[in-house]
Structure formats: C-alpha cells, structure tokens
Image: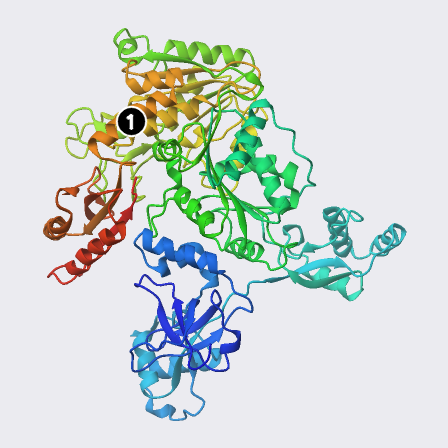
C-alpha cells in the first residue's frame, strides 16, 4: 500500500464506530491491524487503541491527527478476533470500544493522566500570591506530580484553581503522561549463585552460625525450593522472605544467593505431569464416534445431551486431547467460578502445565499473564488449554480449535451490565465460526433454543442416556407442603420425609445437600402489629434480613441498615421475620441435627478469594455432613458420598413472572437432583412443593426432558417467544418518574411507527427503581425470517431521536439483545 496511509482505530470509549488517524511515514512499515497504538483524542487526552484497518482513503476532515506511537512489536489481535469483535459490537448493539473494554484488562489500554511540572524559565516569583507560591514550591520539590497527589487545599484555597492560576502565569506546564503495560512483565527472583554440592551447602550453613538471620533466610530458600528438585527459582515477593531484605542483600554480597530479573510467572497454571486419560466406556465411546462421524459430514456445532453423571467431562477430555495433538488451543467454559477447582483437578491429571485458569477473581497481573500466554507466538510457550468463566470468550486467542461450553443452559453465561450484554454460549459459537473451530455444548438439561437447533439439524446431536457405571438416577420424592402444613407435620421448613432421610444418611456416614435459591436469613422483616416493612431508600424492594450481620440488606444496591429494636411507626417490639433463606436453613438444621457438621455456600460465604475451594474441599473430604446453598450448589458438584438432596420451597422457582420460569425451574431441580447418588448407591431427592401435580414437577420426577421440551415449544410458538422469534429489550432510566414516563412513552410510540404490534410496553418491571433510577422496559419481538440488521438500525435511530427531546439529557437507555 503506497501513498498517504490512514488507520481505523478502536478506542476504549462508549462512542459509536472507530476513529481514523493518519499514519506517520516512520511508523508505516511497522503498523499492522491488531497492534496497540497511542493516539491523541480531544485536545490533550492520550488513549491506547487497537488498529482495525489500514487504508489510503482520506476521511473528509480538515485536520486528521497522527498516530503517536506503536506499542506492540507483534499484533495483539489477529484478523479472526478483529472480525469477531466487529460482529459482537453489531449483534449486541454496542460500540467497539465497549467490546474492547470488556475483553482486555485496563492495564493494556491505559489512558493518559495530567502531569504538572514546573516551567524552568519561570523566575517571577514575586508576582504570585502566597498560596500559589506555596503550591509551586511543592511542585518544584516533586518535579512531576499528578493533580490528585497535591493537597486539595492550600491556605484555604482550592488547589485546582491555584493550578489554573499557575498555568496562566506560565509558572507550570500541564502535560499528559501515558505508560503502556508491557505484555511481558519482569519480576525479581532468588536463585543460588552457583550450583553447590550438598556438602558445600552444609559448609555454608555451618559458616553462617554467627549470622542467624542469613542462615534462616538460606534455610527457608532451601526448604521452599526443595534443593535439587529442579525448582530452584522463587520470587523475592514470597511472604516467607518478608522482613529479610538485609539478610538477602548480605547473602548476595557473599555470592551465596543472587537476584535475577525474569518474566513474571503470574498465570494460574496447573503443575502436574500429564497422564493418559482412561478409555471411554461403551456409551461414551459411541457418542465420541458419533461426533467424529457428524464432523466428517460437515457439522461444527454439537449438543451433547447427557444425564447427570453420564461422563460428559470424560468425553470432553478425549476431544481436548485430540485437538491439542493438532497444535490448536482449547477454551473450556464454565458458568461458575466455584466449578473451576473440581474440573482443574480432573484436567491436571491429563494435560499438566498446558492448562491455565481465567475468571473475575484473578488479579490484573494474572489477567495480563493469561493474555501473554494465549497470544504467545511460540507454540511451545503458548497456553494451550484455558479453563474460564463467561468473560474468557472475549480473549484474543491465536488459533482456537475447540470451544466447550459446559452446562450450556446456565443463565450465568448471560452478561447483563455493563455493555456488551452478550451470551457467552452464543458468543462462543461465533468465535468458533470466525476461527473455523468446533463448538461443543453440553448439558443434562439443554436450553430450549439449543435443543430446537439440534432438532432442526443446525447442530450435531449426541445423547448419553445412562449414568457412568450404570448407576440409577436418584429416586424423586415429592412432598405436598400445603397438606403437611395443614396437618402440622412440618418441622419449621422441613417435611417429615426429608428429616427421616437426613437422619438415615447421617447415621450411614453419608452427606446431604439442601437447596434454597434465596440467600439471607429471611426475605423481609415485618411489624406484627401494624404491618410496617423496612424497604430500601434507593430501590423499590424490601430489605432482606441477614442475621449474621444483624442488618437488613438490599440485594440490588448493597445498602444496609441495623434492625430496629421496635417499629418506627407504632412503637411495637413485635418485629418478625417473613420467609426464609439459606442462612435460616443453616441455623435450623443445626438445631435439628446438632451432631452434624453444617456449611453454607452462597454469595455471602464465598466473597473471599479461596472460599469456594475451602467449602468444596471440606465437602469432598467428609469434613462437612450437610451443605446448604443457592444455585451455586446445583452445578457440577461431583461428591462420591452425597446421597440425599432436599429442594425447599420449589414454588418460588415455578411461580415467577417470566416466560423462562418453567424452563429454569425444570433445569434447576433436575441439576440439583443430579448431585445425589453419583457412585454406587442410588440417591434420593425430596422436592417440597405446594402443588405436587404441577406439570413441571411431573417432568422432573420422570426425568422426561423431551416431553418438557415439546410442551414448552408449543407454548412459546403460540405466544411468539424464542426460539420462534428474536427479543430485544430496551430499558429507559431516569431519576424523575414523570420524565421517565414521558420519554419512554415517546420512544415506544416511535418504535411502533415501524414495528407496530411487535412492540410491548413501555412498562415498569418487577423492580421499578434501582439505585435511585426509575426504569421502564420496552420489549420488541422480531420474527426469525425478518432482516434483523434493518430492525436494529430503526431501533438505534429511534433512540438517537430521543436525544433531541427536551429533558432527555439525564436519560439513560440500554439495549439488550436476547435479554433472557
């Protein structure tokens, strides 16, 4: 390409489209799509962006800014990932910058910060007033400083105003500074100065008797590394070395230890030698051959519908092994961070150090290291198998060959806020499409959409109908709680049948799982005299009572208040709890079975980094007899000794105002039930519900997915819901209810001008106010055969036109494609 060159660049901003910059002649030979560059945006601000396209079509602007510098020596994103990001921005109706921000850690696209430094030519100090002179002396002493690091007030004068005064006097210079994070980070490591023999080590330790701290330091080093094991390099930051800097310096001076700068080892890699996976059983081997056969006939997306404990993971392992042999990368998606440890323990046996882990709880350094690993140009050093949660589907893989979406039905794969509001399952399919890779969707209870596509022949389809080892599926016992309460048979929230089974399991040394999909102690508090209920001051919801915290908490905005000793309305001391959550179950089960070791797994108990692993380890090792929890416990847990599962208040799953409520209820109850009896003994599941003859309960009892699907598909076709149409939800927010009503009404009317009766709303949702923002929703149904690109254009035009309306300046509008 000759002549003047221009580059279209993605900037990490929620602004429409890309931005075009001219390419300076000296940068042109090194510039390639996918590389990070530094550019000026606005008058002074510097941003790190990503080059999408290089061309010689000059934009119709008078002034075109130049690219300031190129950050990368090799492209961070390849052509396939750039196309994938472009698709995501278009499909989910967001900006390329929002996709970039979701995909990469912020340290890889830093923005500039204002730096204040003294002007060396300034000498008219007498012209400054006392506060300005004081501030200038601070700046001169520090040489370069950020405004935020200056004292906010000097002699009762605002520092920012004083800075502006100094700038106008030409006493200081305000500039922009940006430091890009290198893709390779260095860290200090401790090593032996030379390879000493064992006898020489003994002599050195003897010689250090008069220097006990140095001897202690060397002994710690030898104990940590296991000298002679080949793992003789450890980071200086190791906590065991805290406070031993002087001893380390002395040992370095004596040429016993030395400190070297090496590439930081931040990736959570599995450290184990790989072994061959066990051969597949009969039904697994049949499924494996069926996948290979359908692949040969052109299928690239497969749905594996396997009952719980049928060995889907073992099938995945053999497919991963085949793909790694071809030198391809594999992405293994899981819906919950809690599942990663158990899966890692299985994968590490077979793939050793080629596995890494990526999720929201790893540090920024570890995220950078993951990106270095998956984009590594040397195939030997590249991360080959990445186990990750939802966001890992956005990462810039070099050559993915296989993407596995385990528990593909799970709602956790859907990103709600912020934008892009993507579904990781659907995004994985498109990533595989752009990279010519294979997608495996696995579930015991597939989503209606995936099963619909498989029946239509769009996906390959494989079934695993029996459990590994031919273990029977659990026996389902349904308890009519309405009758049990009427006859006064219930003990708190537990039926006699459930109590009997728990007692029997504990007597046999077995374990129990109790499921309630609501955290906290009780749903809300209420005054027994006047009916007063504490509500959130920022959201339109009742506060949930958490007894451990002794506070009432809003689960939407996080606000919490102490529980009042008496009612603020009538003065009564009769403050009572209503409803129940996991905290109350834990409390009451301890009273019923005081000898049992009880644990709880929900958002409140898993806030710390390693809390997931600790709870699961205790369950696996038998240190926990009864585990209570929310939906976290329904996914992927494989506990050998767990034989009894209790599902408390199944009505809350069934009676929710959402067209997917029955689908989610069936999936949740089936998945939780599948945790029972996964080895030698048939498990038992107690479902407590007020209507035991409910259609969904009957499907769960029979484990009849096909009948459940046919019923749901018929209903959705009748009322025109997915998979028979596309849904786009528009949420309009404002802090003033009257303005929201007005603007949402105008937007709904403009959408009806094109979409007609396909537009539902605007209506207030179940929770009409969150964090002081009132919100209304508009739902648009678009037929599958209609051109969705044209529909999205009309939606965006209607939204942009609202910006011209009086009072719309503080309006927030969010578009969610495939919202449920």
Q: Residue at x 53, y 40 (%)?
A: 610
Q: Quadrant of residue 641?
A: top right
**In terms of depth relative to the viewer, which is nearer, 437 or 267?**
437
10 Å crowding of disc 1: few (<14), some (14-19), many (20+): some
| Image-based side of 122 in relation to 758, left or right | right
Of helix, strand and loop, which one carries label 1? helix
Report whether 196 appears left or right of 352. right
> For this view, does 656 lie left or right of residue 121?
left
Tell me which corner region of the image, top left, top right, bottom left or bottom right, holds residue 349: top right
Q: Which residue is mark 1?
A: 712
Can the viewer see residue 324?
yes
Q: Residue at x 69, y 36 (%)?
A: 275
Q: Position of residue 441 (x, y in %)?
A: 46, 36
Tell me if I can see residue 812 in this picture.
Answer: no
Screen quadrant of the C terminus: top left
**Residue at the extreme top of the image, as rendered:** 487
Seen in the picture, residue 518 relative to 157 is either above or below; the reply is: above
Instruction: Please name the colour scheme applied to the rendered image.
Output: rainbow
Q: Position of residue 759 (x, y in %)?
A: 16, 44
């Amino acid at each position: 390409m000759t002549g003047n060159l221009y580059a279209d660049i993605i900037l990490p901003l929620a602004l429409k489209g890309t931005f075009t910059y001219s390419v300076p002649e000296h940068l042109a030979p090194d510039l390639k799509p996918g590389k990070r560059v530094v550019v000026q945006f606005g008058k002074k601000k510097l941003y790190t962006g990503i080059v999408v396209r290089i061309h010689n079509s000059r934009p119709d602007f008078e002034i075109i800014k130049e690219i300031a510098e190129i950050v990368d020596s090799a492209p961070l994103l390849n052509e396939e990932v750039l196309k994938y990001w472009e698709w995501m921005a278009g499909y989910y109706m967001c900006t390329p910058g929002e996709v970039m921000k979701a995909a990469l850690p912020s340290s890889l696209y830093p923005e500039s910060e204002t730096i204040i430094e003294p002007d060396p030519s300034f000498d008219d100090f007498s012209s400054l007033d006392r506060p300005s002179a004081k501030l200038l002396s601070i700046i001169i002493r520090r040489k370069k400083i950020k405004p935020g690091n200056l004292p906010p007030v000097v002699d009762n004068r605002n520092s920012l105003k004083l800075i502006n005064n100094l700038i106008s006097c030409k006493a200081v210079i305000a500039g922009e500074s940006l430091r890009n994070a290198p893709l390779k980070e260095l860290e200090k490591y401790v090593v032996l100065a030379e390879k000493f023999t064992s006898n020489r080590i003994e002599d050195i330790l003897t010689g250090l008797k008069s220097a006990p701290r140095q001897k202690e330091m060397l002994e710690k080093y030898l104990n940590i590394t296991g000298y002679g094991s080949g793992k003789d390099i450890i980071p200086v930051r190791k906590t065991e070395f805290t406070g031993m800097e002087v001893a380390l310096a002395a040992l370095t001076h004596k040429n016993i230890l030395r400190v070297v700068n090496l590439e930081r080892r931040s990736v959570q890699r599995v450290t184990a030698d790989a072994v061959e996976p066990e051969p597949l059983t009969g039904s697994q081997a049949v499924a494996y051959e069926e996948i290979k056969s359908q692949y040969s006939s052109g299928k690239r997306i497969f749905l594996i519908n396997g009952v719980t404990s049928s060995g889907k993971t073992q099938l995945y392992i053999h497919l991963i092994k085949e793909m790694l042999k071809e030198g391809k990368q594999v992405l293994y998606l899981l819906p919950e961070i809690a599942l990663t440890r158990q899966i890692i323990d299985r994968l590490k046996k077979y793939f050793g150090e080629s596995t890494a882990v990526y999720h929201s709880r790893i540090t920024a350094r570890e995220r950078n290291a993951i990106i270095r690993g998956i984009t590594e140009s040397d195939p030997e050093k590249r991360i080959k198998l990445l186990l990750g949660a939802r966001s890992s589907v956005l990462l810039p893989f070099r050559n993915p060959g296989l993407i596995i979406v385990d528990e593909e039905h799970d709602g956790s794969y859907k990103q709600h806020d912020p934008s892009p509001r993507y579904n990781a399952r659907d995004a994985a399919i498109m990533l595989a499409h752009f990279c010519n890779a294979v997608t495996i969707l696995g579930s015991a209870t597939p989503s209606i959409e995936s099963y619909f596509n498989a029946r239509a022949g769009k996906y390959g389809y494989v079934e695993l109908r029996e459990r590994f080892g031919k273990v029977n599926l659990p026996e389902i016992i349904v308890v009519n709680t309405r009758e049990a309460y009427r006859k006064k048979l219930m003990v708190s929230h537990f039926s006699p049948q459930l109590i009997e089974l728990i007692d029997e399991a504990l007597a046999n040394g077995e374990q129990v799982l109790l499921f309630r999909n609501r955290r906290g102690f009780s749903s809300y508090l209420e005054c027994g005299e006047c009916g007063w209920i504490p509500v959130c001051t920022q959201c339109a919801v009742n506060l949930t009572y958490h007894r451990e915290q002794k506070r009432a908490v809003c689960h939407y905005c996080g606000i919490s208040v102490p529980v009042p000793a008496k009612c603020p309305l009538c003065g009564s001391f009769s403050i009572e709890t209503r409803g129940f959550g996991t905290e109350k179950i834990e409390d009451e089960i301890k009273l019923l079975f005081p000898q049992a070791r009880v644990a709880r797994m929900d958002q409140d108990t898993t806030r710390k980094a390693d809390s997931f692993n600790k709870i699961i380890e205790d369950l696996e090792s038998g240190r926990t007899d009864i585990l209570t929890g929310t939906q976290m416990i329904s996914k992927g847990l494989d506990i050998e000794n767990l034989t009894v599962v209790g599902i408390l208040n199944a009505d809350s799953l069934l009676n929710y105002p959402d067209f997917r409520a029955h689908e989610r209820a069936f999936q949740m109850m089936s998945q939780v039930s599948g945790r029972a009896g996964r080895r030698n003994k048939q498990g038992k599941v107690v479902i407590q519900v007020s209507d035991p003859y409910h259609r969904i309960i009957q499907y769960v009892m029979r484990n009849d997915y096909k009948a459940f699907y046919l019923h749901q598909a018929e209903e959705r076709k009748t009322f025109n819901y997915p998979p028979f149409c596309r849904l786009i939800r528009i949420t309009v927010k404002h802090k003033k209810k009257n303005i929201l009503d007005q603007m949402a009404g105008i937007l709904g009317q403009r959408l009806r001008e094109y979409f007609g009766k396909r537009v539902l709303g605007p209506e207030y949702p179940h929770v009409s106010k969150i964090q002081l923002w009132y919100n209304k929703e508009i739902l648009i149904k678009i037929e599958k055969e209609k051109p969705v690109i044209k529909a999205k254009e009309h939606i965006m035009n209607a939204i942009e036109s609202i910006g011209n309306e009086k009072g719309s300046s503080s309006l927030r509008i969010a578009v969610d494609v495939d919202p449920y």
